[in-house]
Amino acid sequence: MTDYTPGMLTLIFPVPPFASTMTVFPLLCILLLFLSVEAQTCSPSGKIKGKTPPPGQCNQENDSDCCKDGKWYTTYKCSPPVSSQTKATLTLNSFEPDGDGGAPSECDNQYHSDDDPVVALSTGWYNNGKRCLNYINIRGNGRSVRAKVVDECDSTMGCDSDHDYQPPCPNNIVDASKAVWKALGVPENDWGGMDIYWSDTD
């Protein structure tokens, strides 16, 4: 039988360097940061049931997606966290009279030409109008463009006359005029849905 002497266990079972307090603490901080980011993930807030649009409703000029009777659509009150490179889906919208949006833009109660680089943001990013009439930078297709926020792409409601019988907007949408798509150099037959990154301007 071997007698125990101080330090013997350390020699037999050396404590790995990463187990020291000096390294465990930073690892713990990183884990907490990761959990904090995960906690910010945007979860659905509910669902609404689609209704068939009345005749003449749901403008399909830009291939609008009209609500389907009985289909359930997910709603959101939030959007993914904003960073210096916020990933989003760029969609096509017309902010002109009789365009996709129907009513004037929420930010200024006006219509906007398809030749103006303007956008609507999903509800969470619209942030109760706090980005109204501010500019954002949009990067995609190897190019970038500066566009003005003029409207909300409503993620909380849809399938009614106020929303032209279109489904609720997903929570990660930058809904852009034709001018934005042109500035990004996207061929017209590819307009409608593209991965982009956006950020607030300085």
Image (tube, rainbow, N blue to C red):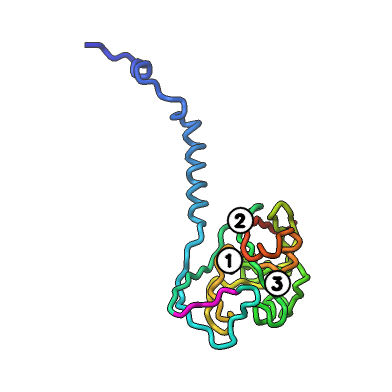
Farthest residue toward the top? Answer: 2
Label 1 crowding class (10 Å Cα cut-off): few <14, some 14-19, many 20+?
many
Camera-side mark, 1 or 2: 2
The stretch in magenta equals: 64-69
Q: Position of residue 172 (x, y in %)?
A: 58, 62
Q: Nearer the viewer, residue 20 or 42?
A: 42
Question: Residues under labels 2 and 3: Cα distance?
Answer: 20 Å
Disc 2 vs disc 3: Cβ atoms closer than 8 Å?
no
For badge 2, the amino acid type reads: Lys
The spot of residue 87 in percent (x, y) is 61, 56
The dot on residue 124 is: 1
Which residue lies most toward the right here? 115
Pointer 3: what residue? 150
- The image's mark for residue 12 is none
Q: Is residue 98 above or below residue 46?
A: below
Q: Please state the horizontal and vertical placement of residue 59, each as a whole percent of the image.
A: 62, 80
* Gap between marks 1 and 2 measured at Cα: 14 Å
Front residue of 168 and 2: 168
Q: Is residue 177 magenta?
A: no
Tell whether position 65 is magenta. yes
Residue drawn at x 47%, y 34% is: 24
Labels 3 and 1: the sequence-earlier one: 1
81 or 11, nearer to the observer: 81
Q: Nearer the viewer, mark 2 or mark 3?
A: 2
